[in-house]
Image: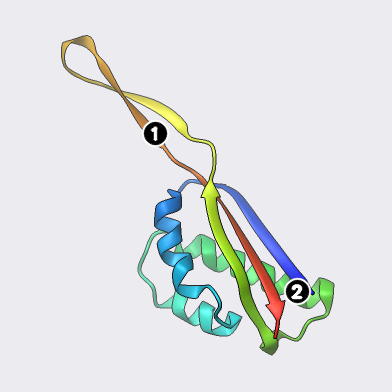
Amino acid sequence: MEARAKVTGVRITPRKVRLVIDVIRGKDVAEALGLLANMNRSGVSEVTKLVKSAAANAINNNKMQEKNLYIAEIYAGDGPRLKRYLPRAKGSASQILKRTCHITCVVKER
């Protein structure tokens, strides 16, 4: 049995989110939420909401025990990139890529 939650189009680069999710992968849900509460990185609030949502899906939809839940999988993939341009010297322009990501969390019971 597993429960999953997914958030799409988060306006944070996948690289920054991966720094956060690598810390909590494989941990119990309660321990992961404790680590996230004390972490000072961008993307922590989005990942916290996602873990809570996956845990709620497991408890309410699949009747799993809250104390036995752990994060089996969590990963961040690339989303669409917003392309913007910055004016430069001599009438040229340089491109700016504003990256987004999709984050998926899978929670299982031990």
Report crowding for label 1: few under 14, some 14 to 19, many 20 or more residues within 10 A (C-alpha).
Answer: few
Residue 104 in the image: x percent, y percent?
Answer: 62, 58
Q: Secondary structure at mark 2?
A: helix
At x 75%, y 86%, the residue is: 65
Residue named by callout 2: 58
Residue named by callout 1: 97
Tell which circle, 2 or 1, labels the residue nearer the N-terminal end: 2
Does residue 8 appear left or right of residue 83 in this picture?
A: right
| 87 over 55 or under it: above or below | above
Report crowding for label 2: few under 14, some 14 to 19, many 20 or more residues within 10 A (C-alpha).
Answer: many
Residue 49: numbered disc: none
Residue 19 lies in quadrant? bottom left
At x 53%, y 36%, the residue is: 80
Does residue 93 appear left or right of residue 79 in this picture?
A: left
The colour scheme used to paint the residues is rainbow
Dots 2, 1 in contact, CB < 8 A: no
The amino acid on which the numbered mark 2 sits, given as a three-letter code, is Ala
Which corner quadrant holds the C terminus? bottom right
Along the viewing direction, whichever of 29 and 52 lies nearer the viewer? 29
The amino acid on which the numbered mark 1 sits, given as a three-letter code, is Leu
Residue 44 in the image: x percent, y percent?
Answer: 45, 65
Real-space CA distance between mark 2 and mark 1, rounded to the nearest whole angstrom: 36 Å
Q: Residue furthest top?
A: 91
Q: Residue furthest bottom?
A: 67
Q: Residue furthest left?
A: 89
Q: Secondary structure at mark 1?
A: strand
At x 57%, y 84%, the residue is: 30
At x 43%, y 66%, the residue is: 20
| 12 over 75 or under it: above or below | above
Residue 88 in the image: x percent, y percent?
Answer: 21, 20
Residue 72 in the image: x percent, y percent?
Answer: 63, 73
